[in-house]
Every structure is written in structure tokens, then in C-alpha cells.
Image (tube, helix red, strand yellow):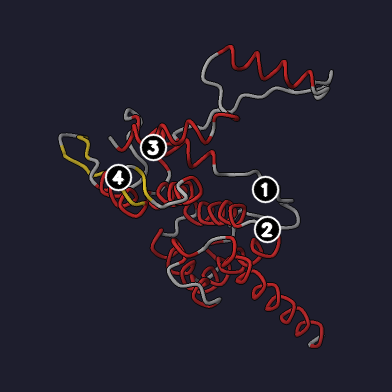
Amino acid sequence: YISRLLQNMYDQATRSTTFFKASNVVHALENYATEARLQSNTLFAAVHVNDLCTFIPHEQLTEPLQHFLYDYVPDGQVQGLTVDTIIELIRFVLQNQYFTFDNKICRQIKGCGSGQPLNHLLANIYIQLRTIINHDNDIEPRGLSFISDHSPVMYSTLIQACLMHAAVIRSKVSDFHNERFDVQIVFLNNGYSITFITEHVEQLFQDFHISNWKSNLNQNTYDKMREEIIEYDQQHQEMKIKQR
């Protein structure tokens, strides 16, 4: 039921950017050419994401869904179900996935089984809500190759510094969330637990006066938080200049 409910919403929301059949591709390409955007050097690319359904932590799957629902459900309800209720149902499903391995019953604590329609939908929403943010690895590296040489205290500061940097350069709350996902994935891939990461993400929002940010962080509250972060960043830069 939840899968069908969300799938209809997703199809409506992504209709302009999703091809449902081959003829859609032809039609879109014709429109692209009519608008004089199809050039001799236009490149076409196909991207395949390996194991998308299995490596994303559950919280990383539910957060984009929550933002998606708040964006596309203006009255906060879908067929009598509130957004919060839908999120809790999805969490229940994700946290109660089991499989057998080596004659043992195991619970899946990361990602979701790839054979269920709901799981594909959650993965698609995760991808759909992301935008590409380019980083120059020589200027602002995203890897943590020196992770073993520093204490967790340093990385708690680094997480918050990355998020503050994201707020400074991203004016839209949706873009900030995309950047936050990137930061969290980097730390997850370097062995830090989702609990450690979440704790310090929560601390950042508390420091800048956003309580219960998962439901309260909208464009208006983000604008206010961003102003505080920019002001803090400017003061920090001025202090560094004075100390030189």
C-alpha cells in the first residue's frame, strides 16, 4: 500500500525528468533539438550505480523521503496518513528486513533488499533529490586519507566545519541537504558510525538554534541559520587575520 501510494506521487513529481518508455526519449530529444540545444559536441551518458540499495544507511534513505514528502504534500497528509506516520512506517519496514546467510537468520542494518518495489523507490528518491556539487580535490578534498592519524575529536569538528562550509556556499535548503548527505557518506565510508556522525550533525543545528531540524528546517529557518553561520564565519576570519 505504501509503495503504491508513494510511487504515484513520485511519478507525478518526476514526470518532466523521467522516461517511462522509449518514445519519451525520442520526444525529449526532438524538443531538445527544437530549442537549438542539441550540438555536434553534445555528449550522452549512461550512469549505473552499483549496489545502491545495499550501501545506504537507513537514515540516509528516510531523510530524502521526508524532504520529498514535505515538498510535494503541502497539507501534510496523503490519503489520511501524515508525513510523520509515513516516515515511521518506512522506518519500521527498513528496520525489520531479514535474510538467511550461512544457515543463520540475519537482520539487514544498512540498505535494503533490491527485489522489493519500495526499496527501488526509496533509492530513486535518494538519487532524484541530489544535485551535482563540484569540488576541486586540490582545494577542498573530500577524502579522509589521513584518518588514522587524528583523534575522533578532530573529526567531530571537521564534520561541523564541512556542514558550515556547505551552508555558506549553498543558498537553497535542498542543496544544503545534498551537501550534507555527501559529507555523511564520506565519513561513513571512512569507518565512522552513523551514530557518531548524527550526533555531531545534531550538535551543529543546536549550536545555531534549530531544534528538531528534520521537521523544522525549511527554507525560511535555513535562511536564518545560514545568516548566523555566515556571520560566525566572517567573525572567525577576522580573528584569524588579527592573530597573524
Residue at image location 54% in from the left, 33% down from the top? 14
Q: Quadrant of the N terminus?
A: top left
Instruction: Tell me, for residue 133, which label it has, or none.
Output: 1
Horizontal side of 187 relative to 238 (left or right) equals: left
| Rendering quarter of residue 123 | top left
- Gap in Å between the C-alphas at discs 1 and 3? 27 Å
Mark 4 lies on residue: 94
Residue type (three-letter) at the residue carrying disc 1 = Ile
Residue type (three-letter) at the residue carrying disc 2 = Arg
Where residue 215 sits: x, y (%)? Answer: 44, 61
Q: Nearer the viewer, residue 101 or 240?
A: 240
207 relative to 176, above or below? below
Farthest residue, direction bottom: 242
Mark 2 lies on residue: 170
Q: Earlier in the sequence, mark 3 or mark 2?
A: 3
Q: Earlier in the sequence, mark 4 or mark 2?
A: 4
Q: Nearer the viewer, mark 4 or mark 3?
A: 3
Residue type (three-letter) at the residue carrying disc 3 = Leu
Q: Nearer the viewer, mark 1 or mark 3?
A: 3
Mark 1 is surrounded, within 10 Å at the Cα level, by few (under 14), some (14 to 19) or many (20 or more) other residues, namely few
- Gap in Å between the C-alphas at discs 1 and 4? 29 Å
Mark 3 is surrounded, within 10 Å at the Cα level, by few (under 14), some (14 to 19) or many (20 or more) other residues, namely some
Residue type (three-letter) at the residue carrying disc 4 = Leu
Where residue 146 sits: x, y (%)? Answer: 59, 60
- Gap in Å between the C-alphas at discs 4 and 3? 15 Å
Q: Please, what secondary structure does the residue beneath circle 4 have? A: helix
What count of labels does the image hold? 4
Residue at image location 42% in from the left, 68% down from the top? 212
Instruction: Tell me, for residue 6, which label it has, or none.
Output: 3
Q: Nearer the viewer, mark 3 or mark 2?
A: 3
